[in-house]
Structure formats: structure tokens, C-alpha cells
Image (spheres, helix red, strand yellow):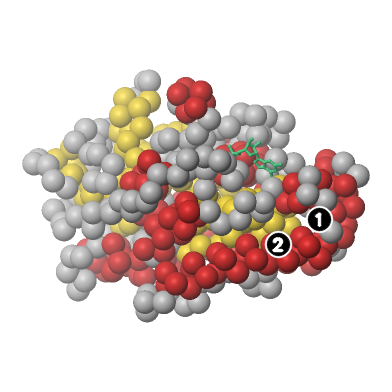
Amino acid sequence: MGRRKKIVQECERLMDEPENIRNIAIAAHVDHGKTTLTDNLLAGAGMISDDTAGEQLAMDTKEDEQERGITIDAANVSMTHEYEGKNHLINLIDTPGHVDFGGDVTRAMRAVDGALVVVDAVEGAMPQTETVLRQALREGVKPTLFINKVDRLISELQEGPQEMQERLLSVIADVNELIEGMTQDMDDVDDWTVSVEGGTVGFGSALYKWGVSMPSMQRTGMDFGDIIDLEQAGKRQELHERTPLSNVVLDMVCEHFPNPLDAQPRRIPRVWRGDDESELAEGMRLVDDEGEVVLMVTDIGIDPHAGEIAAGRVFSGTIEKGQELYVSGTAGRNRVQSVGIYMGGEREEVESVPAGNIAAVTGLRDAIAGSTVSSVEMTPFESIEHISEPVITKS
Ligand code: GDP
């Protein structure tokens, strides 16, 4: 059997194990390194070749995005990662990094349960860092932090361990101040501030593919002194090999982001205002793959062969070919023509996709990004608020 086929089979197996699924987004101020980091994760998980990560910009699928160097459309990629002896299915929804696309960012947040917030170590938290955090928290999505471009502190700014530590701690403090302010009125979440000791903060260089966290430092025995020495000596390949970024980040994702079984009971009351005592509500809270089908469409993509593809989060039931589904705000029903999952950035057709996963569906011709698609007529999900902000020009 080919390697790709094997991975697809493994993804299909993992789809049925919601405790091992993580639906996540990477969110960042423009240029802080979201695209470079994403490519690293895909390469680390064996989904694209290691050599092309960083050049390929796998998420930037549209030509005009590549020309403009920004990611516009929310795209989806999935990968597998082994953590503590168990394979995990990680579905990553891309979020646009540009202020004008705030609506898309929030839509992506609806589909996920965890948001990895990337902050440039040199620039620190920026206005869009605040916006993406607000979007995540409003949707009940748990944050973790990755501080990127740490190589620049060492090689360009020539900072020593003390200075570097102070700078990193100040970035963390700034992010935590934002998180605290935004969650103080949320009685459905515990303390969501991030910390090095708690393992919810990672540091590193997406460009040179190395990363560290408290758990990784304990595992590899590498400390900041070693990192500074290797980076200063230009031994970046060695750094990458000894402490690969993708492992550090994907371990953090598996350990600290909730799986759908943990996330949905908390998130559903936040994003859906229907009858919370109904069977439908129960099905969504329990991630019931035998319940009514409920899909929230977060993105409409165009495939040259298959036409329009509605991608979104299955909150309950199992979506499969031939189902006649209601699309919120439209009359009549649409027939599902195919269902797929993402593998790397490519869509792969499968028999069915159960609750807790991200599905790629064709045939939903009336669906738009934001539609609620379901096997029974239902109260649609809350409309997604566009969080506006002043337009910030790139410096
Ligand atoms: P995005 O806008 O957040 O997706 O950012 P990109 O991933 O496109 O990165 C923006 C720029 O920063 C590119 O020129 C990258 O090569 C560069 N970059 C990304 N990560 C790092 C890093 O860890 N170190 C350094 N020095 N540059 C980086």
C-alpha cells in the first residue's frame, strides 16, 4: 500500500476517536510567522517534504495570495502526530493574518477548540494579536502561545540569556494581560493564561525549524544557554535536529488543547442559542456521531474538478454521501454529493465524517461560509460577529 493511502487510512481511523482529535487554528499578527510555522508542522508530520517547508507556503493556495504574500482565504490542513504513545489527528484551520479579513478569522475560530497564538519575539504583541485573541476567546477557544523569531534576538540583537529571558517574559506578561482582561467575565472557563512552567508557551524559530518549551527542555536537556551557543555558531541544522519545532508545537497541541468531547459541552451554549434541553443540543454536547447531522460551514473553497466545497466542523451526527440536508436561511434541502477530509492540504474523499471532525462536503450548493447545515430544521448557530479594528499599516 502506498504511503499516502496508509496516512488516509490512519486519518479515517482517528476520525472515530474524538479523544485523540484536536481542531486548532494558528492566529497571528501579519508577518509574525504563521505561514512558516504551519509549513513546519506539515513537514514535521510528514505531510510535505522537509526541504520545501518555508518555501512552499502550503497554506497560501491562491495565486494572488502568493503574489501579495499574505494568506487571504481560510484553508484547512490535517496531520497526524504521535504523543504519549497515541496517534492524534490534528485539523488545522488557517486564519487570514490581515486585518481586512476579520470575519474569516472568526469563522475559522468557530470550527476549532484551540488557538495557537504566534507572536514575533522582536515586535511583541501587536494590535492584531489582541484582535485574534479576542476572536478566539469569544468563541470559547483556548489559547496557547508560541513566541517566534527567537533566532533574531540571538543573532541580530545579540541578546544574552538574561536580556532574552526578560524580553520573552514581558511578551508572555503582555499576552496574559490581554487574556485576563478578556476572560474575566467568562464563567465557563478556568484560568486560560499561558505559562512556561505550565507548558502552554513555546519559543523558537519557524524559519530555522527549532523550538523549545519547558517539557521539551526537560526531555532533551537543552537549555537557553545551549540554544544561544548553537544559534551564535550558526549551527541551526543541529538545533533543528536536536529540538525540532514541529515536535515541540504538536506535543503542546496534543497536551494542552481540548479534544471535541471536552470542548463541545462548553462551547455549544456559547455559539448556539437553540433549546438546550433538546436532543439536538444533547447530540452536540456529547459529540454524538449517531445524532442528527449538524455542520457549521466555515469556508467555501473551489476545486477545479469538484466545484464548490463547503468545509466546516461537524458538531453532531455523521455526514455522508446522499444525505439531504437543510441549509440555514434557504428553502429546501441540498443533497451531499461527496464527503472528504483533509490530508496535508489536499482533500481526500472518504465514506463518512463523524462528529468532532472537519469535513469537506460537495453538493451543498446553497451553503455559504457561516451556514448551519443539518438533517433537521434547527436554530442556526449564532451569526459570527466581525470584530472590527482600525486598519493598521504594515511597518
Ligand atoms: P505570516 O504573515 O504570519 O504568515 O508570516 P510568514 O510566515 O509569511 O513570515 C513573515 C516573514 O518572517 C517571512 O519573511 C519569513 O521568512 C520570516 N520569518 C518567519 N519565521 C521566522 C523566524 O523564526 N525567524 C526569522 N528570522 N524570520 C522568520
Disc 2 is placed on an element classified as helix
Residue at x 32%, y 36% (from the top left corner)? 300
Marks 2 and 1, Cα distance to the nearest angstrom? 10 Å
Q: Quadrant of residue 352?
A: top left
Q: Which residue bears the numbered disc 1? A: 159
Crowd tier of the residue under label 1, counting other residues whose Cα lies within 10 Å: few below 14, some 14–19, many 20 or above: some
Tell me: residue 203, above or below residue 198. Answer: above
Residue 27 in percent (x, y) is at: 50, 50
The image quadrant where one finds ligand 1 is: top right
13 to the left or right of 384: right
The three-letter amino acid code for the residue at tag 1 is: Glu
Q: Quadrant of residue 212?
A: bottom right
Residue 251 in percent (x, y) is at: 64, 58
Crowd tier of the residue under label 2, counting other residues whose Cα lies within 10 Å: few below 14, some 14–19, many 20 or above: some
Any atom of ligand 1 within 8 Å of the CB at mark 1?
no
Residue at x 43%, y 55% (from the top left corner)? 131
Q: Which residue bears the numbered disc 2? A: 167
Q: Can you name the residue that lies furthest to the left here?
A: 331
Residue 208 in percent (x, y) is at: 74, 41
The three-letter amino acid code for the residue at tag 2 is: Arg
**Which badge, 2 or 1, comes first in the chain's sequence?**
1
Circles 2, 1 touching at the beta carbon (< 8 Å): yes
Residue 367 in view in this figure: yes
Residue 188 in view in this figure: no
163 to the left or right of 338: right
